[in-house]
Amino acid sequence: MGLLWKINIERPLAYYKCGQFVSTECWKHKEMKLTKDFEVIIGLQDSIFIQLDTLQYEIQPGDVLLIPPGIPYFGYKPSRKGASFFWLHFFPRMDATTFSKEKLINYLMASKINVHKDEINNAIFLPIFFRVTHTDKPFILMKQVLDIANGSYYSTFSVDYAVTELLIELTDQYNKQLLHSTINPNENSYKFAQILEWIRVNIYQNLSVQEIADTFSFNADHLTRLFKKNIGMSTIKYINTLKLNKAKELLSTTSKSIKEISYELNFKDEKYFMKLFKSYEGITPSKFRDAYTNIYINTITVDPEIPIPSHLSAFLNNSDSKESFKINKDNS
């Protein structure tokens, strides 16, 4: 069924380097092979083309590529000007092993009745390549990593924990996709899932509860009861939450004005958008955007030769240290 990487996070992952890259015309990723670090690439705009060993991947917005150590990779095809992506390198502080997808599915299902729960909670599980269903949280978390990494925090653990949180979010989205593709839902849950997906796809429209109810042949009040039962909030609150999550993504990944974002997401006017944002998030859209200003956007090269920080060199070079990690292949 395919292999995943299982990386122990009982200790936080160790941040190495990161950036947001925007390509020039006909740019191709340089040839590389990692030694002990992993790299995560998250597509932002247009496509980039990376060959990992013998397999070729076209990375589009929302796609995630996990590059493990020891495998050569390079750009097999040029990208168009403006193609962009996040890139992040990290070291596991503990074990990193390959893991079967089938075994993870069994663990996820068993964890619902508290069996194998520790194995799930203490590790991240990611395939080499997958697409995130909801890009808002990963994009915002990646912006936080960029901001913290280029800030002046007194402790290096601040960025380590941010990186770990990002990888947990990616794992959570992948695990949910895996379970959804494995378990046959009943008719009611399947229809509710269709409603959620329809709202997500149409989130840029001026959605109303009545329109959604009519689309799926529901009474509007019954639809709201269904939302409260399944996700603990009303239909309109869910719509607003999704719109504001998308707004936060646009605020943190684009230079669009607040007025442009308000218009793009079909809020009735800019003032209403700002008022709603503050009521849900506790801060204004401008303050949200200003919270993450230390962003490293590298438009000349990607993966610059940055020396491994001394605090990481110590445990990487010390094979007897309790903090050293090993990379194994689990053939189960």
Image (tube, rainbow, N blue to C red):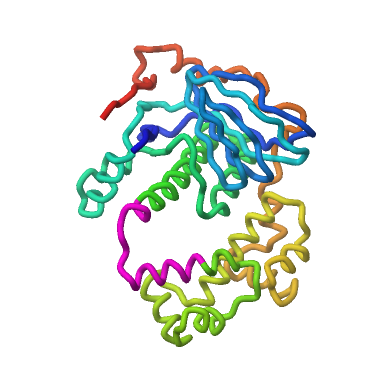
Percent across and percent down for residue 150 are: 66, 35
Q: Residue at x 75, y 38 (%)?
A: 80
Is 26 situated left or right of 279 in this image? Answer: right
The residue at 61%/44% (across/down) is 60
Quadrant where the N terminus sits is: top left
> In which image quadrant can residue 256 be found?
bottom right
Residue segment shown in magenta: 179-197
Q: Is residue 300 above or below residue 138?
A: above
Residue 172 locus on image (x, y percent): 42, 48
- Indicate whether 92 appears above or below 44: above
Residue 50 x %, y %: 60, 30
**Magenta includes 20?**
no
In the rendered image, the vertical position of residue 70 relative to residue 332, given as above or below: above
Q: Residue at x 79, y 34 (%)?
A: 25
| Front-lying residue, 330 or 225 | 330
Figure quadrant of residue 29: top right
Residue at 47% of width from left, 71% of height from top? 195
Q: Is residue 255 left or right of residue 275?
A: right
Residue 98: horizontal and vertical position, in percent? 35, 29
Q: Is residue 196 found inside the magenta-colored segment of the image?
A: yes
Classified by dominant secondary structure, the portion drawn in magenta counts as helix
Based on the displayed image, in which of its 4 quarters is residue 244 positioned? bottom right
Q: Nearer the viewer, residue 42 or 279?
A: 42
Q: Is residue 66 left or right of residue 258?
A: left
Q: Quadrant of the C terminus?
A: top left
* Residue closest to the eye, 296 or 207: 207
| Number of marks drawn | 0
Q: Is residue 192 left or right of residue 112?
A: right
